[in-house]
Image: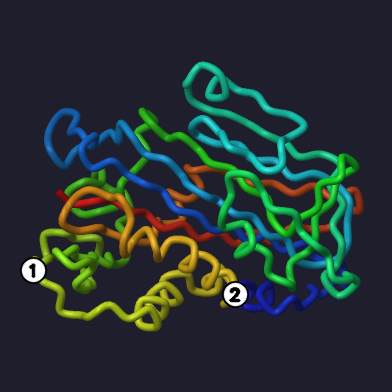
């Protein structure tokens, strides 16, 4: 019920405005680097995993303040450049890193004129990540945009892979897996597998690819974590990669990361000068090529 209230933008009983933070992203696993440590099924380490395109949107009242991100691995490719960055992961490849964007001003969407956003070098999908209803974020250095962005290198961090046969004992599994099959002419279709269990795969594609049907699966996975426009952003960003990307293998597993795994990717904090409370909603997909 509280999540529903947050999605509708309804104020709490106290009447205080609330800042709503929504974030989505994708974690890529290199299946060739997943190694068993000790007894199979007991503990696995992912040698190579990267959180690609965590995109942050803010909604709610106008405010001034700061946004910070703390990550298990090394943060890189930040937009805009943060005012503060540190931690061993930033320089030495060790665990833990931290960034902070300071002097943020957030403008309500309804007060905007027709803002002309500049192209962002290296972020070809930036135009997709500007929902009109999101706050426009500004800084004294001239930055203004609808989103914040960063990526995280999770290599060697024992970041969990929530699929049956890979997860450590007691770890939560992905609720389902979309397993996309590649044919000589492209994507033939997909299977929908329960409880992150790739052993249930039939090696065929019982479902012919349909954007609307896959989009409905993603909506079920995300629950009320993201708005419809944000889910559209996510899939419009990654659908080309899933269907015709440079992943190697015969199939590509796409699955929802359990909440615990999302919190291991990073934690995000918003601090406003006005002291507004912050409501956080995050949804990440995992992707791994199957050889």
Nearer-the-camera pick, 14 or 38: 38
Q: Looking at the picture, how far across and down is residue 194, in whole percent?
A: 22, 69
Disc 1, SS: loop
Q: Residue at x 63, y 39 (%)?
A: 78
Nearer-the-camera pick, 172 or 159: 159
User: Looking at the image, what colour scheme do you see?
Assistant: rainbow
In which quadrant of the rendered image does the N terminus lie? bottom right
Task: Identify the image quadrant of residue 8.
Answer: bottom right
Any part of residue 191 in sight: no
Mark 1 Cα within 10 Å, few/some/many (few <14, many 20+)? few
In the picture, measured across the screen, residue 74 lies left or right of residue 80, that is left
In the picture, measured across the screen, residue 111 lies left or right of residue 72, that is right
| Mark 1 vs mark 2, CA separation in Å | 33 Å
Any part of residue 154 in sight: yes
Q: Residue at x 57, y 77 (%)?
A: 228
Q: Is residue 94 above or below residue 281?
A: above
Nearer-the-camera pick, 118 or 19: 118
Q: Looking at the picture, how far across and down is residue 75, in whole percent?
A: 56, 34
Mark 2 Cα within 10 Å, few/some/many (few <14, many 20+)? some
Disc 2, SS: helix
Q: Residue at x 55, y 74 (%)?
A: 224
Q: Residue at x 63, y 62 (%)?
A: 129
Residue 202 numbered mark, or none: 1
In the picture, measured across the screen, residue 212 lies left or right of residue 191, that is right
Q: Which residue is mark 2?
A: 229
Badges 1 and 2: C-beta atoms under 8 Å apart? Answer: no
Q: Looking at the picture, how far across and down is residue 100, in whole percent?
A: 73, 36
Residue 242 numbered mark, or none: none
């Amino acid at each position: 019920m509280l999540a529903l209230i947050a999605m509708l933008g309804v104020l709490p009983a106290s009447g205080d405005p609330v800042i709503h933070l929504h974030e989505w992203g994708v974690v890529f696993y290199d299946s060739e680097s997943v190694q068993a440590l000790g007894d199979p099924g007991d503990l696995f380490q992912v040698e190579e995993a990267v959180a690609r395109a965590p995109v942050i949107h803010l909604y709610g009242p106008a405010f001034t303040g700061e946004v910070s991100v703390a990550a298990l691995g090394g943060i890189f490719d930040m937009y805009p450049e943060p005012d503060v960055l540190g931690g061993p992961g930033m320089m030495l490849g060790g665990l833990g890193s931290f960034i902070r964007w300071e002097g943020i001003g957030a403008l309500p969407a309804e007060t905007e004129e027709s803002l002309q956003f500049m192209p962002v070098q290296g972020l070809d999908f930036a135009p997709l990540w500007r929902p009109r209803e999101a706050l426009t974020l500004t800084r004294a250095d001239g930055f203004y945009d609808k989103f914040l962005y960063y990526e995280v290198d999770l290599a060697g961090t024992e970041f969990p892979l929530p699929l049956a046969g890979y997860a450590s004992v007691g770890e939560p599994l992905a609720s389902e897996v979309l397993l996309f099959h590649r044919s000589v002419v492209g994507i033939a279709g997909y299977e929908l597998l329960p409880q992150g269990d790739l052993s249930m795969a039939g090696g065929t594609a019982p479902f012919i690819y349909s954007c609307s049907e896959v989009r409905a699966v993603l909506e079920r996975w995300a629950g009320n974590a993201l708005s419809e426009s944000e889910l559209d952003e996510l899939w419009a960003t990654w659908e080309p990669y899933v269907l015709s990307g440079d992943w190697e293998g015969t199939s590509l597993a796409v699955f929802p990361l359990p909440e615990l795994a999302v919190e291991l990717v990073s934690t995000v904090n918003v601090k406003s000068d006005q002291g507004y409370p912050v409501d956080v909603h995050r949804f990440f997909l995992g992707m791994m090529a199957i050889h």
